[in-house]
Image (cartoon, rainbow, N blue to C red):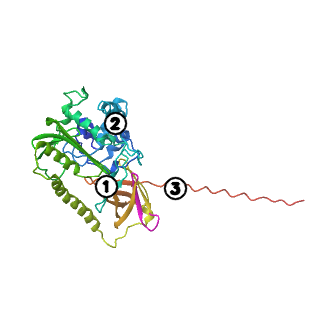
Amino acid sequence: LMLSVPVAGAHATTRVLLCHRTGMPGHVLWWINNHDFTRREIVSERLQHLAPSKPFRSVWQYQNYMFATVGYLVEVISGKTWEEFTKERIFGPLKMKTANFLVKNPDKSGKTAKLYTENKKGKLEETVPLVIDAMGPAGSINATVEEMCEWLLFNIDGGKAHGKQLIDEKTFPELHKPNISYELMPFEVPETKKMGYALGWFVNCFRGNKVVEHGGNVAGASALVSTMPDKGLGVVVLTNAAGTQLTQVLVNQVYDELLGHDDIDWVDFFAGAVKPLKEAAAKQQQAFLDSKIKGKKKSHDTDDYVGEYTHPGYGAVYISKENTGDGLRIKYNYYESELTHLHYDIFHFVHFGMTIPASFRTGISGDIDTLCIQFEGMVPPTEFRKKAVEKKAEPAEKPAKAPVKRTAKK
């Protein structure tokens, strides 16, 4: 595996990839809605150019692309696509007959839920499903509650499905064994003690009982799969709203009902715990906008900023002029928005609901040559180099015609 830190690439075992301790941060906006790149491209060409934020194996940092990397490893070893392998080795034995990896948009079957995301006014708006094919192994499965219950039973029964042991009894516990401590939310949850992160699972102790669970969030949907294996209990919550804590609220409430507890209002707790986090994030974004220095114009004419800017890991960013006026637009991963001037050569734009800072840099030639974008907050801004525009060769001048000699007629 090629990573920007050679020692990390050389020693990044499958276990390291699956428990998020490579030293790499989320780099979420790098892959969201990227329709074009493949898993092979992610592993062979892109990862080595992404910046780490922590030393290798030093801390837990959640990201998705290492699961795509492991999915590609499955393809190399099995000779099948990850989707084919998953259908054959998991969906089939677990009798998950309608589970799939991609919902067409628009969906004319009427069998899948519509997705919703909260806007700035707090109202839910229907969300267009994202294209995340390459990142599929990290969370692209669509299934019914009944089918997800088969997955719960498989994990509660130690890798057994319908009487057949699919994973060796000695190997299966490794999936649920904590490998590294983690910090998911900056607040403590009552009656919950974090035990560690296993191979794609959070392992906790809830009211004295071991709980193995994992959530999922994509544009417009949130889910949580949770098991209390020693009690033979499991809960799955599927919602069609983005970033909601309702999943954990319901799981904790169900466990409390089954265990005979009613001393905590989980709705009130999570609403109170999450509210200040949202307020702090909103204040941070507003502070950036309020930093505007009035009267400081950009250093170049608008046309000078237009062009294609590239990075070997993040790919291409396109800057174009607005159809009217003197403004600019930015396009990245099929998502386009207005590029708003702040001061000097500092701009900002909205990308998947987040305000992203961007700045242009002038080279020694006097021309704009670099675009720096803060796509990942844990590392310095990513530098995109402006692609030179090939000038069309001017047609060569035609040679002057030789003067015509005229002879006098006899």
In which quarter of the view is residue 336 placed? bottom left
Pick whichever, 228 or 263, lies toward us: 263
- Highlighted magenta segment, given as a residue range: 322-334
x and y, in percent, of residue 24 in the image: 26, 46
Residue 117's tag is: 1
Left/right of residue 3 with respect to residue 228 in the rendered view: right
Residue 51's tag is: none
In which quarter of the view is residue 43 placed? top left
Amino acid under disc 2: Tyr
Q: CA distance from mark 2 to mark 1?
A: 31 Å
**Chain-order first, disc 1 or disc 3:** 1
x and y, in percent, of residue 390 in the image: 50, 54
Asked which secondary structure carries label 2, the reply is helix
Amino acid under disc 1: Thr
Residue 72's tag is: 2
| Quarter the N terminus occupies | top left
Q: Is residue 325 magenta?
A: yes
**Main secondary structure found in the magenta portion:** loop
Select label 2 or label 1 by which is in front: 1
